[in-house]
């Protein structure tokens, strides 16, 4: 069994929150840190893959929150590094809604259905806020229950893409409502690699610093008032004064990592209350494009009797012209269902939907890419989603440290959970709290050391009630450096020594 020397801090997870946390540690002089990453790469839920000749983002793909009164830190970093992005305008998707016969719903019908759905959703949320989710409470008017394919499609778009709460979304309020899709061959992950260069040794874009340890699956955290011992799946043991745990909320809800002693009930109860969202972008490559590609046609919707069934589509011609790639997004139940079946079965379902919209003569896809975030034991989902009406105590308990274990990740961000910038800022905030704890420990140790130095003096004088004369007499029996140190602590002028 391998073992490492004692580190000041171990960071578990090399996603955006873990990397930002490690960067702040290094900037504050803590260089004896170790980063343990379960997979063979950094990035976490930021992950690119080559597909159809271009780089596509399997996880986080957008920089959300641009153009507001404050600057989104992730957008700032992307701008500094020249990351290529494309503006995404979702507003016209509601006017590109196809029925199963391939007809587009008239704009008036679509607009009316959308308005009714928004009003109904707002009413439902307000009722929940007023009644604490009591579905049996009396209401003056029952909200609309979506029944028709177009109502189901719009309901899906609202609740799975746009609306999350009655109050304005903090990201949009602070940073702006514009969203930009990352469309750079270097990938979204390029931002993380550039962050790492500031504190880890790299060469030609590769991280060579042995403080980053890949393929290290953490299975146990043994913690006490004196430190934390981390055990990994391959039998290695790492020890540190503190740990920053940036595992996703899905992993925290799983049994991947055990804690000795177990986490307190208030902690596990809060973790259990947070929802885990699954968001699956399925990529399809075609020999040529057969879908509309003019202005305001980037996004389109399929209205089906089953809610969320291959509903939301996007072509990538704006992002990568000539790529001939379509993307369909599934969420939650549909995501989990698709993850359990073969890619061939998923391709068959998607092609049936596309032939409903564009006719039987469209070509077969030549390739398919299906991410599986739910079945990835190192992620167990895509992002956190707190209940709409949620006690702030839940979030406070989730991010609160347990002894020497500090928790971070987008799920610990009070205002920006679910977003990349939420993970980035959470890593910074968690590390600031840890640094303050380290400073408290240092001050405590300094005080204990001072008392330790005074003990020989007290023994020499034989009394706990020292007069200044007694103290000076005792000091004369010490060496000169100790005399100077103790005289400063006891307030005795050097001139009388």
Image (cartoon, rainbow, N blue to C red):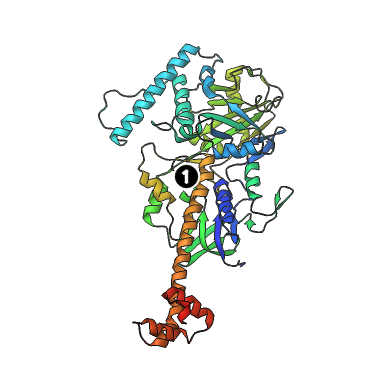
Residue at the extreme right of the image, as rendered:
204
Within 10 Å of disc 1 (Cα), the crowding (few <14, some 14-19, many 20+) is many
| Residue sitting nearer the eye, 244 or 285 | 244
Residue 241 visible in the snapshot: yes
Q: Where is residue 319 in the image (x, y as percent from the top left)?
A: 65, 28
- Residue at x 54% of width, y 18% of height: 96
Residue 316, quarter of picture: top right
> 296 left or right of 285?
left
Q: How many numbered discs sit on the rendered protein? A: 1
Residue at the extreme left of the image, as rendered:
138
Query: Element under label 1?
Result: helix
Residue 144, quarter of picture: top left
Circle 1 sits on which residue?
411
Residue 13 visible in the snapshot: no
- Residue at x 54% of width, y 28% of height: 178
Q: Point out the image quarter for the N terminus.
A: bottom right
């Amino acid at each position: 069994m391998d073992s490492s020397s004692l580190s000041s801090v171990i960071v578990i997870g090399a996603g955006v929150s873990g990397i930002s946390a490690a960067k702040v540690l290094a900037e504050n002089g803590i260089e004896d840190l170790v980063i343990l990453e379960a997979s063979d790469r950094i990035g976490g839920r930021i992950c690119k893959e080559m597909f159809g000749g271009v780089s596509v983002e399997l996880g986080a793909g957008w920089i959300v929150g641009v153009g507001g009164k404050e600057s989104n830190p992730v957008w700032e970093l992307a701008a500094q590094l020249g990351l290529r992005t494309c503006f995404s305008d979702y507003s016209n998707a509601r006017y590109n809604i196809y029925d199963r016969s391939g007809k587009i719903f008239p704009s008036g019908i679509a607009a009316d259905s959308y308005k009714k759905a928004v009003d109904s959703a707002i009413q439902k949320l307000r009722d929940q806020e007023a009644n604490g989710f009591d579905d049996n409470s009396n209401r003056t008017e029952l909200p609309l229950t979506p029944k028709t394919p177009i109502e189901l499609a719009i309901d899906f778009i609202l609740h799975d893409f746009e609306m999350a709460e009655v109050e304005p979304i903090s990201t949009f309020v602070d940073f702006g409502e514009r969203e930009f899709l990352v469309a750079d061959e270097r990938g979204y992950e390029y931002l993380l690699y550039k962050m790492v260069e500031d504190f880890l040794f790299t060469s030609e874009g590769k991280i060579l610093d042995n403080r980053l340890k890949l393929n290290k699956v953490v299975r146990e955290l043994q913690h006490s008032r004196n430190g934390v011992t981390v055990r990994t799946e391959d039998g290695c043991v790492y020890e540190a004064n503190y740990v920053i745990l940036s595992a996703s909320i899905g992993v925290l809800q799983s049994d991947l990592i055990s804690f000795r002693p177990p986490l307190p009930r208030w902690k596990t109860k809060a973790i259990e209350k947070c929802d885990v969202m699954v968001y699956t972008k399925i990529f399809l490559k075609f020999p040529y494009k057969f879908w509309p590609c003019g202005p305001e046609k980037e996004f389109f919707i399929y209205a089906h009797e089953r809610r969320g069934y291959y509903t939301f589509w996007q072509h990538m011609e704006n992002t990568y012209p000539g790529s001939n790639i379509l993307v369909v997004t599934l969420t939650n139940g549909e995501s989990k269902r698709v993850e359990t079946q073969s890619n061939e079965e998923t391709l068959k379902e998607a092609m049936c939907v596309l032939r409903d919209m564009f006719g039987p003569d469209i070509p077969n896809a030549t390739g398919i890419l299906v991410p599986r975030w739910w079945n990835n034991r190192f992620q167990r989902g895509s992002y956190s989603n707190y209940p709409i009406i949620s006690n702030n105590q839940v979030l406070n308990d989730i991010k609160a440290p347990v002894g020497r274990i500090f928790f971070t990740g987008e799920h610990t961000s009070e205002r920006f959970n679910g977003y990349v910038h939420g993970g980035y800022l959470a890593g910074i905030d968690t590390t600031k709290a840890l640094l303050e704890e380290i400073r408290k420990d240092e001050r405590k140790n300094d005080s204990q050391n001072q008392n330790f130095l005074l003990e020989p003096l007290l023994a020499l004088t034989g009394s706990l009630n020292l007069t200044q004369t007694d103290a000076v007499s005792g000091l004369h029996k010490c060496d000169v450096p100790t005399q100077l140190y103790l005289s400063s602590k006891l307030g005795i002028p050097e001139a009388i020594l």
